[in-house]
Image (spheres, rainbow, N blue to C red):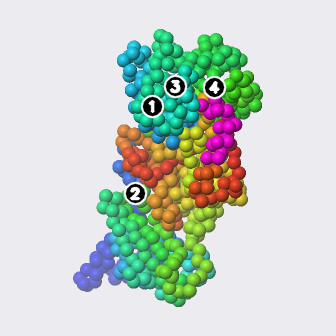
Amino acid sequence: MVMINKIFYKLKLSILLATSMVFVFGSLKVFATDIEFYQSNDILFYSPEDTVGDCIVKANNTDYSGGSILNSKQLEQLRSNAIFYQNAVAQPELAEFNIPWQVLAAIHYEETSLARGSSNADGPFQITSGGYPVKPSYTDAEFQDAADKAALFVKNKIGNLDLTKSDNIKRAFFLYNGAAGAYKTQALALGLTQNQADNGEGSPYVMNKADLKRDPGVEPTKSNNTWGQFIKNGGAVEYPADSSHYGAFIVYQSLSGLCAGGLASGGMDISQARDFMAIYRNDRNSLNYISSNHCKGFDPRSNCVGFSVYFMNKYTTIKGFKPSVTLTGNGVDITQNILLWNAGLNIVRDRTPAVYSVFSRDDHDPLDPGHTGVILGINVDKDQMIIGQASWCQPLSSFVPAIVSLKQWTKSPDYTFAHIEKYVKNI
Amino acid sequence: MYKRKKIITIIIVITALFVLTIWYFLQKSDYGPQLRIKNYDSKIKNLPNTRKQSIESMLYSTVKSNNADPQNVSDANIREGSNYQDYISDKKLYSGSFIVDLPSIKQSYVVNYKYSSIDNSIDNSGYPVLVSCLSGDKIIYSEFKCTDLLAPQYIDYDPIVKSLPYDTLKYRIRASVDSENKVTLIVNMDLSNEDYKIGREKSVNKYKAEISAWIVSLGLDPNKYTYDYIY
C-alpha cells in the first residue's frame, strides 16, 4: 500500500511538473516579443506639421516640396570648395561686413554650378570685368584669387547692408545679378510688396523654386506666365523660367543649416511600434496592399519587401509597386525602386534616416537579396531607431519591431533611405 | 472506498497524459510542413531549432515548386565538404551555407542562413534563410529547370538602372520605368549664368552629347532609351 502511495505521489508530481512546463513554455513566446526593457523609453511623437520659423528649406538640402536641392556631385564639390570661400570672406578688408561664406558658395552655384574653372574670361564667379584664366580646371591659387575677388565684389555691391538679416542676403544676391527691373515687376505682379520686390523676391536668380508660385516645374506656375526669366542676353523675359535650377537664397539657406532638420527624434515609441506591427500581422486585407508574389507555403506578409510595400501602399500616397504589374524587387532594391516607381516626385534617397523613411540594406553580395523595412521611430539622445520589418519565409509571430543603433546605421555604407515621409497619411 | 478513489485518479491521470500527448503532436509548427535533412544535427551547430524548421520548411516548399513531391523524399543529406559557418562575435551572429542533395529526385539546393542570439536582432530579419538553385560545377545530377522561391520577386531592370542616379555639376540623371520595363531617363539640367552666356540650346546640346558618351562608357546603347530633359 505504501508502495502504491509513493507511485501515486510521484505520478501527481510528474503531472504537476508537466503541466507547469506546458504553461511556462507556452508563455515564453509572449515574453520573447514583449521585452520589458524597451518599455522604459520616452521617444517623442512625430508631428508632420512641425515647422521651424519661416524657413523655406525644411531640412538639409530639401526644398519646400521635399525635393533635393543640390545633387551628390555638387555637395561633394561644395565640401572641397568651402575652404576657399571661407578664406575669401576672411580677408582683412571684409572684416566688418560679416559676409557668410555660404553667400559666396550660393553665388558660385548660380554663376558656374560650382565649377573650379571657366569657359570664358569672367571666371568661376562670372564677374564681367574679365581677365580670368579660360580653362576647365583652375589651380588652387587661381581659384582662391577668383573667390577673393568675388567676395570683394559682393562687398562693393552690398554697401552697409546687415547680412545677418535674411532680407538683406536676398538683396545681396539680387544686386550681384544686376537687380533687373523686370523681376521687380514680376514680384509686384505676384502680390509681393515693393520692399520684397527690391529684395529680389521676384528674381529666379534669387528665389527660383522657393515655393509653389515660384516653381516653374509645376502647375499652375508652369503654364500661367507669372514666373519667367531672361534666357538670352538682351532678350525679354521668357515663360516659364528654367525649372531645374534653384535660386541663390534657397541654396544659401540650405547650406547655412538655418533650418536644418538633420537627424531628428520623433515617430513611434516601442509600445506604439508593437501595436503598429500587430496591425500588419493581423490585417486581413493585407493582400490589397502587397504583391501576390511571396514565399510559397507562408503567409504573403512573410516578406520584408511585403512590409515596406504594405506601408507605402496603405499609409502613403506614393506607389509601392512597379506600375501595373505589382512586382517589387528584393529588399536591397526597394529604395532604388521607389525612385523608379515615383519618378515624377523627385523623392530623395540618401544615407540619412528619418522617421517613416524606407530603408534598403545592401550586403554587397550579388546573391544576397539584402533587407528592407521602415523607420518607425528615432530617439537621437538614446542613439536608437525603431525598425518595422518582416522577414522572408518566417512566421508572422516573429514580426516585431527591432531597436538598432542610430549612429551605426548612419555611418554604415550598407543602408540607403528613401524619403517618403512627406507622403505619409493616416498613421 | 480508498481503492476506488485511486482508480479514479489513475483514470484521470491517464486521460490527462493522453490529452497532453495528443495536444503535443497536434501542435502545428509555425513553419508548416518540412523536408527532413537526415544529417542536419551532426553537421549544423549553434542554430536554434526554429532555424532548422525554417530551413527544412523552405526546402519542402522549394522542392514542391520544382515539381517534385517532398513528402516522398526521405534521403536529403548535407553534402560532405559543402558546409561552412562564420561567427561575428559582437553581433553574436552565425552565418553559413551548405549544399543539400536529394538523390531520390536527383536535385540539389544551396542553403544560406543567418542567426543572431541577440533578441530581436536586425540580423535575424530580412532573409535569414534562403534555399536557392545550384549552379556551375556544384551540380552533380543532370540539370533541371530549377526555380527558387525568391525568383518571382526579382525584377530584371535595364542595367543602366544600377548606375543611377548619376550626378555631375551640370545635371542629374534618374530613371522611370513603365509596365513593359522600358526605361525613360529623366535628366535635370542645372544651367548656370555661364551656360546662358554661351546660349541655352548650345549648352544643352553639349550636355546631351556628354550623357550619350557616358552611356556608351557603360557598354550600353544610348539610342535605346527615351529621354526627358528638364531645364
Chain where mark 4 sits: A
Say whether disc 3 or disc 4 marks the residue closer to the N-terminus. Answer: 3
Q: In the rendering, at what x and y percent does residue B82 appear?
A: 41, 79
Element at label 4: helix
* Residue B203 within the segment the image draws in magenta: yes
Q: Is residue A182 above or below residue B219?
A: above
The answer to the question of whether label 2 and label 4 lie on touching residues, with beta carbons closer than 8 A, is no
Q: In the rendering, at what x and y percent does residue A81 appear?
A: 44, 34
Q: Which residue is mark 3?
A: A131
Q: Is residue A136 above or below residue A153?
A: below
How far apart, in angstroms, are the residues tagged by discs 3 and 2?
62 Å
* Side of A382 where A375 appears, left or right: right
Amino acid at circle 1: Phe
Q: Is residue A282 visible?
A: no
The label number, if any, that marks residue B121 in the structure image: 2
* Side of A64 where A391 appears, left or right: left
Q: Is residue B46 visible?
A: yes
Element at label 3: loop
Residue nearer the viewer, A292 or A70: A70
- Tell us which disc is closer to us: 1 or 3: 3
Provide the residue span drawn in magenta.
Answer: B194-210
Label 1 Cα crowd, 10 Å radius (few <14 / some 14-19 / many 20+) = many
Q: Are marks 3 and 4 on the same chain?
A: yes
Q: Which residue is mark 4?
A: A204
Q: Which residue is mark 1?
A: A143
Chain where mark 3 sits: A
The answer to the question of whether label 1 and label 3 lie on touching residues, with beta carbons closer than 8 A, is no
